[in-house]
Image (cartoon, rainbow, N blue to C red):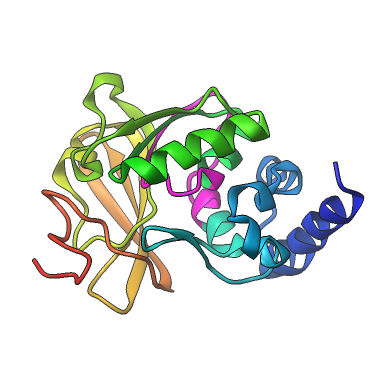
């Protein structure tokens, strides 16, 4: 392990995450350990621990560290739970969840992106993550119900199948809204009803699929 990379991770967590109010110890430990630079194309690795999104190919990005931490923090506690992730991307979010002791089921619609994520996860020691290539807006019913779900792409509304696959007392976090800007929301399912909380503006690439956007131009 590169000492410089390890130092960069600790600085990332201290400056970008702890200082902004995220304190969950399992999440902090995971983000200090997972080698984020291994989930980023080599030419962008010098910027791996900066507070910004980075391209990973095929029009997709890896979210800034703080956004990964914030979305994950809205799901805690997580240890021992089953989580559905929609939008595998580089695999970094899945690795953070796996490091926290989560059973991760991740869905990615772009085969090339999924293949790269598998390689990234294997290289980083998180090959226990299950990945499926399909329409993420339909979820992954084979392993439902899930204790939590995380959508890592912008959706015009939360897809119905993902709500249906959520266990009672389960939570779902997603960026919801139109092109250009969305709002991060958390849904909590309690005895069949859904409570909603809002956590401010975010901006993500579109969630494409039957229950999401129809194409990358956000047309419905």
The quadrant holding residue 220 is: bottom left
Name the spot of residue 157 as percent of width and height, x first.
19, 59
The quadrant holding residue 12 is: bottom right
205 left or right of 28 in image:
left
Residue 176 colored magenta? no
| Count of numbered circles on the image | 0
> Residue 190 or 124: which is nearer the viewer?
124
188 left or right of 212 in image:
right
> Residue 116 or 34: which is nearer the viewer?
116
| Image point (68%, 53%), residue name | 37
> Residue 49 or 176: which is nearer the viewer?
49
Q: Can residue 106 be seen in this view?
A: yes
Residue 78 colored magenta? yes
| Image point (56%, 46%), residue name | 92
Name the spot of residue 119 as percent of width and height, x first.
54, 35
Name the spot of residue 66 as percent of width and height, x first.
60, 63
Above or below residue 30? Residue 14 is below
Name the spot of residue 102 as percent of width and height, x first.
54, 29
118 left or right of 113 in image:
right
| Image point (53%, 68%), residue name | 53
Q: Can residue 100 be seen in this view?
A: no
């Amino acid at each position: 392990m590169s000492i410089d990379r390890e130092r960069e991770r600790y600085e990332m967590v201290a400056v970008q995450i702890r200082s902004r109010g995220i304190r969950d110890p399992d999440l902090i430990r995971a983000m200090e350990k997972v080698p984020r630079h291994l989930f980023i194309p080599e030419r962008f690795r010098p910027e791996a621990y900066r507070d910004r999104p980075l391209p990973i190919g095929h029009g997709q990005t890896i979210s800034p560290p703080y956004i990964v931490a914030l979305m994950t923090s809205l799901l805690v506690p997580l240890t021992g739970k089953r989580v559905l992730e929609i939008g595998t991307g580089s695999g970094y979010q899945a690795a953070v969840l796996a490091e926290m002791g989560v059973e991760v089921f991740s869905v990615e619609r772009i085969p090339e992106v999924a293949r790269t994520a598998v390689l990234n996860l294997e290289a980083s020691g998180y090959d226990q993550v299950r990945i499926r290539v399909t329409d993420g807006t339909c979820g992954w019913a084979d392993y439902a119900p899930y204790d939590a779900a995380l959508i890592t792409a912008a959706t015009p509304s939360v897809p119905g199948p993902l709500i249906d696959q959520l266990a009672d007392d389960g939570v779902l976090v997603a960026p919801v809204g139109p092109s250009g800007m969305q709002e991060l929301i958390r849904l909590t399912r309690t005895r069949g009803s859904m409570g909603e909380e809002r956590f401010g503006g975010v901006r993500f690439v579109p969630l494409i699929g039957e229950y999401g956007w129809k194409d990358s131009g956000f047309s419905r």
